[in-house]
Amino acid sequence: MTAATRSYVPALSFDALTPLYDALIALTMRERAFKTRLIEQARLTPGQRVLDLGCGTGTLAVMLAAAEPGASVVGLDVDPRILEVARAKAARAGVAVEWTLGSAADLPFPSSSFDRVTSSLMLHHLTTPEKQAALASVRRVLRSDGELHVADFGRPHTVFTSIVASVFRLFDGPERTAANLDGRLPSLIADAGFVEVAETEHWTTPFGTLAFVRARAAEM
């Protein structure tokens, strides 16, 4: 395992909590609903190659493969233990997903090799420089006019989500959550070489504001 793949934050910040991840997200984040919405936003078509960045336990990647069987879906994560959970989940669902161990900041794929990249609840785990590196890497592997679709924590939009955000900063660390909670994720995406960057909607969750972002890869 490389140095890049050793340095990561587990899905719930601690390795011991990884087995609880699916149950917690399903109970608190309306997981199926928000991931279904993200898939609808991505508008997959047969023949596309799709990367789920920071795929975690594989729920979104499996849903992508089921939603468009004609697409080729790749799930990438830096945590080898969580990829084992993802592989088992895909096998139970009877769908084909290519699972890859690697860092979002240095994607192990050729340039211009994907039509879509999705990411759900992963970018807030990265520091701002790590976000910038990951988004630049995403732009590299996307074909021109390919699209990035993100669902992640964003700027609080209610009194409740503002209160929750203050707790969330302490739990995941201000250096990792600041760009998300300050609403800077769209500008970081634009700086990485994307155009038509838009926050398409936001949902209130027990952990704060869940923001949906869509962007198109600019021609290089």
Image (tube, helix red, strand yellow):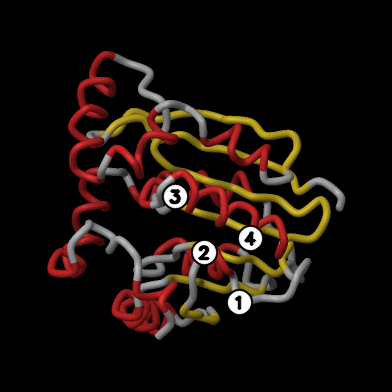
Q: What residue does disc 1 label?
A: 108
Q: What residue does disc 3 label?
A: 123
Residue 139, percent across and down? Answer: 70, 55
Residue 168 vs residue 88, the one in the foreground:
168
Are dots 4 and 2 in contact, CB under 8 Å? yes
What element does badge 4 sit on? helix
Please rate how many residues cluster around mark 4, counting C-alpha atoms within 10 Å: few if below 14, some from 14 to 19, many from 20: many
Tell me the residue at 49%/80% (across/down): 99
Q: What residue does disc 2 label?
A: 104
Residue 122's place in the image compared with 208, above or below, is: below
Q: Earlier in the sequence, mark 4 or mark 2?
A: 2
Q: Earlier in the sequence, mark 3 or mark 1?
A: 1
Q: What residue does disc 4 label?
A: 137
Q: Earlier in the sequence, mark 4 or mark 1?
A: 1
Residue 182, percent across and down? Answer: 42, 26
Identify residue type, mark 4. Ser
Please rate how many residues cluster around mark 2, counting C-alpha atoms within 10 Å: few if below 14, some from 14 to 19, many from 20: many
Task: Assign the N terminus to one quadrant of the image.
Answer: bottom left
Check the image and name the residue furthest to the left: 16
- As measured in the structure, the alpha-carbon distance from the residue carrying label 3 to the one carrying label 2 is 9 Å
What element does badge 1 sit on? loop
Q: Earlier in the sequence, mark 3 or mark 2?
A: 2
What element does badge 3 sit on? helix
- Quadrant position of residue 203: top left
- As measured in the structure, the alpha-carbon distance from the residue carrying label 4 to the one carrying label 3 is 13 Å
Q: Is residue 102 left or right of residue 146?
A: left
Residue 157 vs residue 26, the one in the foreground:
157
- As measured in the structure, the alpha-carbon distance from the residue carrying label 3 to the one carrying label 1 is 18 Å
Q: Earlier in the sequence, mark 4 or mark 3?
A: 3
Identify residue type, mark 3. Leu
